[in-house]
Image (spheres, helix red, strand yellow):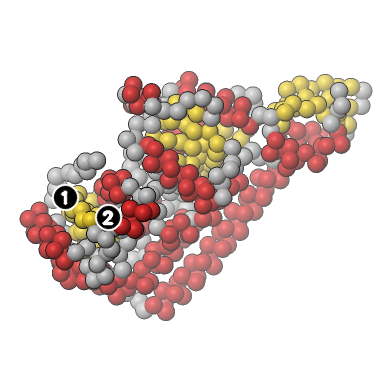
Amino acid sequence: MAITTHDTNTELQDRAILVSLVTDKIKRTGIDPELSLQELVQLAETAGVAVLDVLRQNKETPDSKWFIGKGKVEELRMAADGLGANTAIFDQELSGAQVRNLEEALDLKIIDRTQLILDIFAGRAKSREGIIQVELAQLSYLLPRLSGHGKNLSRLGGGIGTRGPGESKLETDRRHIRDRITELKRQLDEVVKTRELHRERRRKSGAVQVALVGYTNAGKSTLLKQLTDADVYIENQLFATLDPTSRVLALPGGKDVVLTDTVGFIQNLPHDLVASFRATLEEVNEANLVLHVVDASSPMREEQMEVVQSILQDLGAAGKPQITLFNKSDICDSGQLEMLPTGEGYLKISAFNPEDLTRVTELIEDELAGDTLTFRIPADRGDLSSLLYRVGEVLEQNVDENDVLYTVRLNKEDYLKWGYMVADFVDPQ
C-alpha cells in the first residue's frame, strides 16, 4: 500500500519523517504494518505535522539502543538533513533510553506513536472527565521515560509532544508526578461514580440505550448529528471528537432511546489510554443495541472492522445485539458496494441521505422490538402503565371495567430486566 506524504510547509511547526520497524513479533501478532503506517500519516497530519518521508525497516528484534539498526539511524539522519526535517515519528513505542540515544545521534525531536496519539487526545478532550483521563494517561506514559525526554522538554516553541500536562509539570521530580497521578486517579474515581449514578438512573427509568461504535473517522458523530440534531464537533480527521455524547433519538413508533457516540477505535491504541478511558468505553456495555459504523469507502475496511470487534471483545461487549452500518456509501464505487455484506444486521447508508436515516431508525426499532404481550393493569396502577410505555412499544390500549388492557411489544432483554414488575399482570388472552 502506498503511503501518501505531502510537500513541506514552512509555516508548520513540525516537519517529520515517519519510521516503521517491522519485527518478527509484529508479524506474529497479525498487525498490518502498512495499515498502521497509513494511520500514522493521518495521525501526524491531524496533529498539524508536515510528513516529508517514510522510512521502513524489517528486523528480527528491535535494537536495544537505537530501536532501529545503526545503519538505518544514519540513513534517517541524512534524510532529515536533506529534507529539512526537525522531527522523527516512530510507529512503535520507544523506551526513554532509546529516545535519548536517538535525540543525541540525530538532533531531532523524537516522538513515538503513543505520544502522538496522547498529544492529539490532549487537544480534543473538553469535558472534565476527558481532560483528567488524558493527563493521567500522559503522566503514566511519561513517568518511566523522564530521563529520555530532556531535549523534547527544553525545545522552544511547543509543537507535538509538549501539549497537555505542560513542561513545568514534566520537569518536576518523579515524586511530584506520582502525587499528581494519585490525585488524578482520585478525581477520576469521583467522576466515574457520578457516571455510574447516571447509568443507574437510566436503568431505573427503563431508558433504552443504543451505542455508536466504530473506527475513528468512520462517521459516528456525523450520524449522531443527523439523527438527533446533536450539537457535536465534526471534522474529517482522526479523533475529531473524544468525549462521549448522548442524545435522545425518537423512533418511528414514538418510543425514545438514548443514542451515545463513543470515542473512535484505532489499531494499537495505547494501553495507558485504554485503561484511562475504560469507564467511558463501558458505556457500550450498558447498551441494549450496538451500532457498528464502518467507513465503507476505506480500502482498510476489513482490518478496521476486525480492530473494532477485538476491542469490543476486550470490553466484554462482543455478545451485544449489533447492527453494522456501512457508512459513506455515497462515495463508494460500484465495486466497493458489491463487496459489502448484505442481509440481516447489515445496512448500506449515507449519513447525509434522509431516506437512509429513516431506514436506520426503522432497523433500530425492529431490532429492539420483541414479543408482543397483553397486560391487564389496574386503573390505579399508573406506575406500571408508565413503565410499559418506557420499556416497550405500546401497540394498543383498551379499557375493560376497572382495568386497562395494554398490547405491548417488548424485546427479550428489557423483559428480563423489567418483566418481574409486570409478570403478574400478563393477560392469558
Task: Specify whether 331 is left or right of 207.
Answer: left
Q: Nearer the viewer, mark 1 or mark 2?
A: 2
Q: Which residue is mark 1?
A: 53
Q: Amino acid at mark 2?
A: Val
Q: Nearer the viewer, residue 24 or 115?
A: 24
Q: Residues within 10 Å of mark 2 (few under 14, many from 20)?
A: many
**In the depicted structure, whether residue 78 falls above or below residue 299:** below
**In the depicted structure, whether residue 327 falls above or below residue 193:** above
Q: Nearer the viewer, residue 234 or 321?
A: 321
Q: Which residue is drawn at the image coordinates 33% and 55% (left, top)?
A: 26
Q: Which residue is mark 2?
A: 22
Residue 308 at x, y percent in the picture: 45, 44
Task: Specify whether 397 is left or right of 2.
Answer: right
Q: Which residue is drawn at the image coordinates 34% and 58% (left, top)?
A: 25
Q: CA distance from mark 1 to mark 2?
A: 17 Å
Q: Amino acid at mark 1?
A: Asp
Q: Secondary structure at mark 2?
A: strand
Task: Specify whether 151 is left or right of 395.
Answer: left
Task: Specify whether 344 is left or right of 233.
Answer: right
Q: Which residue is drawn at the image coordinates 27% and 55% (left, top)?
A: 22
Q: Residue furthest right?
A: 401
